Image: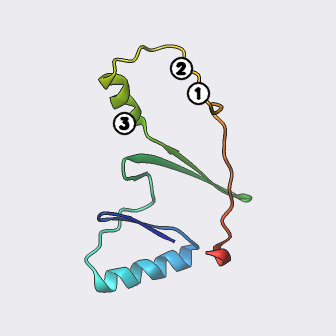
Amino acid sequence: MMLSWIDDNLILGYPEDVEQFRKDLEAGFKCKYEGPLTEYVGSKIEMTRRESGTEIKITQPVLVQSLKDEFDLPEGKPPRTPGQQRVKYWFEIQMNQI
């Protein structure tokens, strides 16, 4: 799977497929490999690989801080929201179904 935002591309899949796709892109375009994913389009990405699968945590600390600064939000108890805080949502992608 490839995600693209302007000139930032993210390639996901089996390691050997990702490597081959990257080589194919580099054969036709000038590309810069940035290494393992830690940030994408302003989002901080944390990946934890386990036997059961890979856990991906996506946060936007810079955006949250800028909103706090812009609207002069006080520190303290976070506001109530419709969703529960710190809930991990799980979904599984079968690579053969993509």
Q: Which residue is mark 2?
A: 78
The answer to whether residue 55 is above or below residue 87 is below
Question: Could you tell me residue 53's position as x and y percent?
Answer: 69, 59
Q: Secondary structure at mark 3?
A: helix
What is the spatial separation of the Cα atoms under label 1 and label 3, in whole angstroms? 20 Å
- SS at mark 2 in the image: loop
Q: What residue is rendered at 47% in x and 77% in y? A: 19
Count of numbered labels shown in the rendering: 3
Residue that mark 1 sits on:
81
Residue 24's quadrant in the figure?
Answer: bottom left
| Left or right side of 17 for 8 | left
Q: Nearer the viewer, mark 1 or mark 2?
A: 1
State the residue lying farthest toward the left.
30
For discs 3 and 2, the disc positioned in front in the rendered view: 2
Q: Which residue is the extreme one toward the right?
A: 52
Quarter of the image with the C terminus is bottom right
Which of the two discs, 1 and 3, labels the residue nearer the N terminus? 3
N-terminal of the pair, mark 3 or mark 2, is 3
- Residue on which disc 3 sits: 62
